[in-house]
Image (cartoon, grey):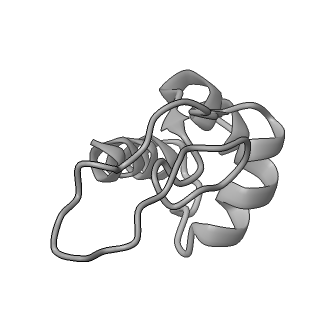
Amino acid sequence: MFAAIVARLNDQLLGAGKSVLGFLNLWLCSTAAGMGALNDVVGGNNLACSGGTTRFYAAQGWDPVTGLGTPSFTLLASAAGL
């Protein structure tokens, strides 16, 4: 789903004569997250994982279970300058 959102943002950026997002890590962690475009998930876990893997709980901010959170297309578009 997230890849589709980024593809749609890139399509709209190109349509507006702007460059595509490119490498997302810094932009997501600074600009997009700073604008609240990623909804932090603070509840849940991956305790159902098997195979001897380490298990994690969701926490405030980045965590191994939910990453940066769920995207808001409208706010990501605004953060991208659309």
> Which of the pair 70/19 is nearer the observer?
70
Q: Is residue 42 left or right of residue 31?
A: left
Q: Residue furthest left?
A: 51
Q: Is residue 7 left or right of residue 36?
A: left
x, y percentage for residue 10? Answer: 43, 52
Instruction: Indicate the quadrant where residue 27 lies.
Output: bottom right
Image vertical order of residue 73 relative to residue 52, above or below: above
Q: Residue furthest front?
A: 52
Residue at position x 59%, y 55% from top?
Answer: 18
Q: Residue furthest top?
A: 74
Image vertical order of residue 39 relative to residue 4, above or below: above
Instruction: Indicate the quadrant where residue 49 lies.
Output: bottom left
x, y percentage for residue 46? Answer: 35, 50
Q: Is residue 43 left or right of residue 78?
A: left
Instruction: Indicate the quadrant where residue 76 lies.
Output: top right
x, y percentage for residue 71? Answer: 50, 35
Q: How many marks?
A: 0
Residue at position x 53%, y 42% from top?
Answer: 16
- Quarter holding the N terminus? top left
x, y percentage for residue 33? Answer: 74, 44
- Quarter holding the C terminus? top right
Residue at position x 28%, y 45% from top?
Answer: 4
